[in-house]
Image (tube, rainbow, N blue to C red):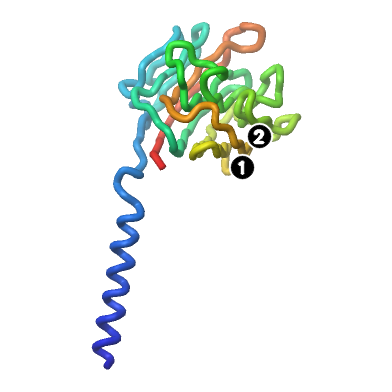
Amino acid sequence: MKKLIRNFLQLTILVMIVSGCTSNPLGNSWNTLIDAGVGLENFNRIGDANWRSEGGAIVADKGKGGHLLSKDSYQDFEIRAEFWAATNTNSGIFIRITDPKNIGSVNAYEVNIWDIRPDPKYGTGAIVDVATVPVPIANKAGGQWNVMEIKAQGAEMVVTLNSVVTVRANHSKFSKGPVSLQYGAGVNGAEGGPIKWRKLQIRSL
């Protein structure tokens, strides 16, 4: 009887292990696009921003504006990004881009990084024209390293900055497309502050 129980328990454990493996296929593993200053080869450059590898990060601090556009397209996914921004940095992560030649909030979701945006309700942590943050902005990025996480699954989107959820949104206008990292102009067309990306990871859901 004891042997029968032991065999049953062993079989139960085996079934649980196999079930766990099949519920987390290799296709859902993280894909690292940027790590320690390596990764420009994973993107196409749009615009005139001076993207380069420097000090263990991918950096831009000059130009009228531009994007690093991913070579792959994504539908449902999670993003984890480590970045440094100045107070006057205008940057962000664009997702589900539908027009890679003319990237903007009218044809993609723009998850913003801009502490001093003139319209602060779409400042850092917001999704421009979709989901606002409280004003005055409580969660700022300037002058420090930050971790931004984005989850987009169907119409549901959640943005987290440094472990704090900044917005939740339900919006279905854009369903699939590449992602991009932005270097943008500052207030009234002034040159924006620097943006540094130390790590960017993405996985499909």
The residue wearing badge 1 is 164
Quadrant that contains the N terminus:
bottom left
* Marks 1/2: CA–CA distance: 8 Å
Q: Residue at x 54, y 14 (%)?
A: 184
Q: Amino acid at mark 2?
A: Asn
The answer to whether residue 147 is visible is no
Numbered disc 2: secondary structure = loop
The earlier-in-sequence mark between 1 and 2 is 2
**Can you name the residue that lies furthest to the right here?**
136
Q: Amino acid at mark 1?
A: Val
Image x and y of residue 6, in percent: 27, 84
Quadrant in which residue 43 is drawn? top left
Image x and y of residue 60, in percent: 46, 16
Q: Residue at x 46, y 20 (%)?
A: 98
Q: Residue at x 70, y 17 (%)?
A: 118
Numbered disc 1: secondary structure = strand
Q: Residues within 10 Å of mark 1 (few under 14, many from 20)?
A: few
**Can you name the residue that lies furthest to the bottom here?**
1
Image x and y of residue 106, in percent: 56, 17
- Camera-side residue: 120 or 59? 120
Q: Residue at x 49, y 9 (%)?
A: 62
Image side of residue 117 versus residue 47, left or right: right
Image side of residue 10 versus residue 46, left or right: left
The answer to whether residue 203 is visible is yes
The residue wearing badge 2 is 139
Pointers 1 and 2 in contact (C-beta within 8 Å) = yes
- Camera-side residue: 11 or 113? 11
Quadrant that contains the C terminus:
top left
